[in-house]
Each structure stands twice: as structure tokens, then as C-alpha cells.
Image (tube, rainbow, N blue to C red):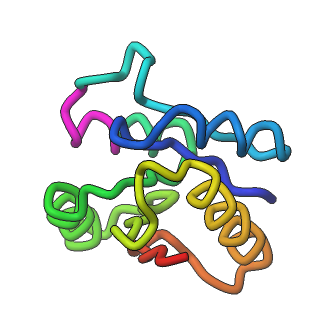
Amino acid sequence: MSPRFLLDEHISPKVAGILRNSGFDAAAVAGSPRARRADPDLLADAVREGRILVTYNTADFEPLLQAVVKDHRRIPGLIFVSAAIPTSDPGRLARALARLAGRLAKGEVTAMYGLFLSD
């Protein structure tokens, strides 16, 4: 089964559009009613919807992930995007996520405990 993504508000909605045009299920926070929601609420939305949250915001989401792991809760996952993939290049991020989606679908990797995407 192909992973479903929720892209944090610092990620262009263009990335979600590129992924959807390639057959992936991707939703963007930016430009949606979820914009400006607190990070714990976004993570809760992702869990409720069975989506992997994709973010550049390691500083805020890493502690949230640690709390989830400590409490033995299961989540679809978190993908931390490296600054080596600039936010100004939505195509590059979409391609990297599409490649990762293939590996996730095959069970080669899991994002449940956090995954670092560097291209």
C-alpha cells in the first residue's frame, strides 16, 4: 500500500500537487484550513488520517516523536527533510518523496520512528 503524506505548512502545496499528479495521496497544510495549527495538532491530524507527516521542522517535531515513542503509541510516521533539499525546489522534494514512497510501500524502511530524507 502506498503511503499517504501530510506536508507541513513550510512545504509548498506544489509538492502535494506534483505527488498527486504522480498517483500519490498527499495533502498540504499550507493554504488549507490547517495552516497555523499547533504542531501537536498537525501530528494528531496525521495520525487520525493515517498519514506520514513530512516536515523540515526537526526542532519542534523531534520532541513530539520522542513522546510518542516513550508512550509506546503507534503513528504512521514522520519524515524529516534535510535542508539539502531546498524549500524553493518543490520538484526535487516531490521526486525524493516519490522514491521514498516506493521503499516504504515495499517495507524496506519505516517512518514510524522518524526518517531522515536527504535526497
Marks counted in the figure total 0
Residue at the far bottom: name it. 108
Q: Quadrant of residue 54?
A: bottom left
Q: Nearer the viewer, residue 30 or 61?
A: 30
Residue 52 in the image: state x and y as whole percent: 52, 53
Q: Main secondary structure of the magenta part?
A: helix
Q: Is residue 118 above or below residue 41?
A: below
Is residue 40 in the magenta section? yes
Residue 47 in the image: state x and y as whole percent: 45, 45
Q: Nearer the viewer, residue 16 or 71?
A: 16
Q: Residue at x 65, y 48 (%)?
A: 4
| Residue numbers of the magenta segment | 37-43
Q: Residue at x 41, y 51 (%)?
A: 87
Residue at the far top: name it. 33
Residue at the far front: name it. 88
Name the quadrant of the C terminus.
bottom right
Q: Is residue 90 left or right of residue 105?
A: left
Q: Residue at x 64, y 40 (%)?
A: 26
Q: Residue at x 64, y 52 (%)?
A: 91
Name the quadrant of the N terminus.
bottom right
Q: Is residue 18 above or below residue 58?
A: above
Q: Is residue 89 left or right of residue 26?
A: left
Q: Is residue 30 left or right of residue 108?
A: left
Q: Is residue 45 above or below residue 5?
A: above
Q: Nearer the viewer, residue 8 or 113?
A: 8
Q: Quadrant of residue 64?
A: bottom left
Is residue 34 in the magenta section? no
Residue 60 in the image: state x and y as whole percent: 15, 55
